[in-house]
Amino acid sequence: MSDKTYLTKGGYNKLKDELDDLKTNVRQQVLEKITEAKSHGDLSENAEYEAAKEEQAQVESRISTLERVLSTATILDEKDIKTDKVYILTTVLLKDLDRDEEVEYTLVSSEEADSENGKISVKSPIGKNLLGKSVGEIVEIKVPKGIMRYEVLNIKVK
């Protein structure tokens, strides 16, 4: 049985759009590549055919993954998210106690994670350790580089 996936409405729509594009456009484009490669003759030594078949496998795998994620998704409404503790979809202001710097993260599902925009997965080492914490708590997070220490300064919903 697969885990439930929590998504924002925007995240759900983005994945749904990707699925629709894969099914209606990309799948057809890959089939055209396979047909073209087949027309070149001997398939046993046809690198173009092998590449197209590999691409087809990747596309079908992604379609399967998206269908699974979307079928188990629960869409969270940000107005229903509490800010007494760190939950999925909360934005957390932290003080890095080792560097004396402030950082801000929004906790999201793995499917919506985007570290460049401060969105980290609740399944990441930082996300896992922040869940359930309250303002004022000190969090020690074991990461490959060592132990990171943060103080939770603020919790909000953007």
Image: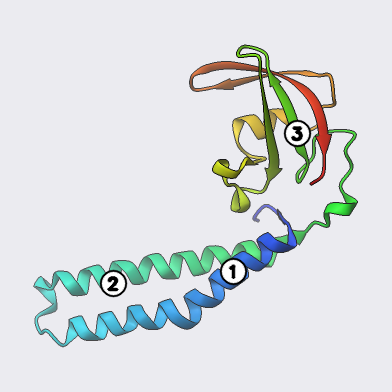
Dot 2 crowding, Cα within 10 Å, few <14, some 14–19, many 20+:
some
Number of numbered callouts drawn = 3
**Rounded to the nearest whole Å, what is the CA distance between mark 3 and mark 2?**
44 Å
Q: Give the amino acid type for the residue marked by disc 1 in the picture.
A: Glu
Q: Amino acid at mark 3?
A: Val
Q: Mark 2: which secondary structure?
A: helix
Q: Considering only order in the chain, which callout, 1 or 3, is on the residue closer to the N terminus?
A: 1
| Residue in the picture at 77% in, 60% down | 75
Q: How is the image coloured?
A: rainbow
| Callout 3–callout 1 Cβ contact below 8 Å | no
Q: Is residue 52 above or below residue 156?
A: below
Q: Mark 1 to mark 2: distance in Å?
A: 21 Å
Q: Where is mark 1, residue-wise?
A: 67
Q: Earlier in the sequence, mark 1 or mark 2?
A: 2
Q: Which mark is residue 53?
A: 2
- Count residues near mark 1 (Cα–Cα under 10 Å), then give few for <14, some for 14-19, many for 20+: some
Mark 3, residue position:
92
Q: Is residue 59 left or right of residue 127?
A: left
Residue 134 location in percent, x, y? 85, 26
Q: Is residue 43 above or below residue 85?
A: below
* In-image side of 12 versus 74 (left or right): left
Q: Give amino acid for label 2.
A: Lys
The residue sitting at the front extreme is 101
Residue shown at the point (78%, 41%) measured from the top left:
90
Task: Give me the residue at 80% from left, 56% from top.
Answer: 76
- Examine the image and state in which quarter residue 70 appears: bottom right
Earlier residue among tags 3 and 2: 2
- Location of the N terminus by quadrant is bottom right
Nearest the eye: 91 or 1: 91
From the viewer's side, name the closer residue of 116 and 143: 116
What kind of element bears circle 3? strand
Tag 1 near tag 2, CB within 8 Å: no
